[in-house]
Amino acid sequence: MNTSVVSETDLRYPVGKFDWSGDSREQRQRAIREIAEMPAKLRAAVAGLNPQQLETPYRPGGWNSRQVVHHVADSHMNSYIRFKLALTEDTPTIKPYDEKLWAKTADMQLPVEVSLSLLESLHARWVALLRSMSDADFARRFQHPERGELTLDQNVALYGWHCRHHVAHITGLRERMGW
């Protein structure tokens, strides 16, 4: 078997698909650590990329690195708001969004620095919030119209994975391209 050939599935899910194995304090702490470390890891992943490299899709038909960085900012802002809603309301129904359409909006052409700076500030607030939460807080829920009811424990695990997932899109591209 030729291990140098990477399937498109592997390119789409470089750290594997998200798997919720149940809540545990250890998994929660790992996810919070990943969220805390993500802005620096994402900044390092795109460091030194020129405009042409930033426009290179990480897989055929996939987003380019610029879109990935801006998507992460969009997604993490939405997640942060979902945490705040679930902590302050009784099982609120959140508003989903079409990430593929958001990836086509004009602000996706801004320099990646705009979203990298936003993520540093957002994650500082988000991690402070996460570290202040009790077990009961992590058991709080929100209603996702497409995915059903989710706990904040599930959501923090999802976003720990989301951090690894998108950083790996860019670092994997850099490895394959020799950048």
Image: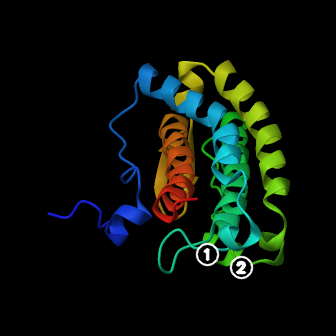
Percent position (x, y) of residue 107? 83, 71
Percent position (x, y) of residue 150? 49, 46
Rendered residue at 49%/56% (across/down) = 175
Which of the labelled discs sits on residue 104, or is there none? 2
Residue 62 visible from this viewpoint: yes
Q: Quadrant of residue 50?
A: bottom right
Amino acid, disc 1: Lys
Q: Quadrant of residue 22?
A: top left
Rendered residue at 85%/56% (across/down) = 114
Which of the labelled discs sits on residue 116, or is there none? none
User: Cβ–Cβ below 8 Å for labels 1 and 2?
Assistant: yes
- In what element is the residue under mark 1? helix
- In what element is the residue under mark 2? loop
Rendered residue at 51%/65% (across/down) = 177
Q: Does residue 151 appear to the left or right of 110 in the view shown?
A: left
Amino acid, disc 2: Lys
- Measure the C-alpha gap from mark 1 to mark 2: 7 Å
Rendered residue at 64%/48% (across/down) = 92
Q: Relative to 167, is 51 above or below? A: below
Q: Nearer the viewer, residue 6 or 12?
A: 6
Q: Does residue 5 appear to the left or right of 59 in the view shown?
A: left
Callout 1 crowding tier (Cα within 10 Å): few <14, some 14–19, many ≥20: few
Q: Does residue 12 appear to the left or right of 21 in the view shown?
A: right
Q: Nearer the viewer, residue 29 or 170?
A: 170
* Residue tagged 1: 100
Coloring scheme used: rainbow
Percent position (x, y) of residue 146? 50, 65
Q: Nearer the viewer, residue 150 or 13?
A: 13
Q: Relative to 64, is 132 above or below? A: above
Q: Which quarter shows the N terminus?
A: bottom left
Q: Quadrant of residue 67?
A: bottom right
Q: Relative to 7, is 25 above or below? A: above
